[in-house]
Amino acid sequence: MLRGVDNLLTADLLWVLAAMGHGDDIAVVDEHFPADSIARATVYGRPIRVPGVDCTSVTRAILSVLPLDETASESAWRMDDAGVPGQLPPVQAEVQHEVDLARGASVPMGTLGRDAYYDAARRAYAVVWTGDVRVFGCFVFKKGFLAPPALAQARR
C-alpha cells in the first residue's frame, strides 16, 4: 500500500494513469459493457478490472490523482441513456458529483450516444471495467496537466 493513494488504484491502473499524456482519455465502464472486446482496440490493449466496485468509487479514486483537462471544451462524458432530458440515472448523477468535486465547480459532462461512446472507448488509452451493475455507468475522462506553480498562480 502507498500512503495517500486510494487502494482502488491498482498497480496496473496507476501505471496507466501515469503513462497517459495530456489529452489522452480513459473510459470507466459498468459490468454490462463489452469491456474485453472494446479494450483490445485501446493503447493498453486489455481491460483493467476493478471487480465488485461501483463506478462512483472508481471515478473518485481516479480523479484523486488524474487532473481533468481544463483547456478542452469538455473533459468528461457520459453515455446518453436517452431517458428523461435533464434527469440523470443515479450512477451518472453520482459520477457528475465526483467530477464537480474534482473540478471545484459544476461542469456538466458531455453526452455520447451508444455508438459514439463505444467509438470513444475504443480510442481511449485504456478501459477500466468496474463491477457496477447499474446500467449507463459508462464514462470517459480526458487527462489534463498540472501547471507549474508560477503558471498556476498567474491563472488565478
Image (cartoon, rainbow, N blue to C red):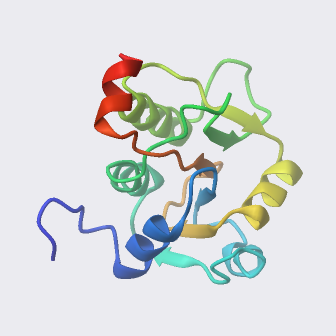
Identify the residue at the far right of this view: 115
Q: Residue at left 42%, top 52%?
A: 66
Q: In which quarter of the image is the N terminus?
A: bottom left
Q: Quadrant of the C terminus?
A: top left
Percent position of residue 103, x then y: 42, 30
Q: Is residue 139 left or right of residue 130?
A: right
Q: In this view, does 31 lie to the left or right of 124?
A: left
Q: Residue at left 53%, top 23%?
A: 107
10 lies above or below 141:
below
Q: Pick the residue in front: 25 or 136.
A: 25
Q: Residue at left 54%, top 50%?
A: 143
71 lies above or below 155:
below
Question: Can the viewer see residue 51 in this picture?
Answer: no
Quarter-of-image position of residue 78: top right
Q: Is residue 138 left or right of residue 65?
A: right
Percent position of residue 59, x then y: 43, 51
Q: In this view, does 37 lie to the left or right of 107?
A: right
Q: Pick the residue in front: 133 or 36.
A: 36
Q: Pick the residue in front: 20 or 40.
A: 20
* Marker count (numbered): 0
Question: Can the viewer see residue 56 in this picture?
Answer: yes
Percent position of residue 130, x then y: 50, 66
99 lies above or below 66:
above
Percent position of residue 27, x then y: 62, 59
Q: Residue at left 77%, top 63%?
A: 123
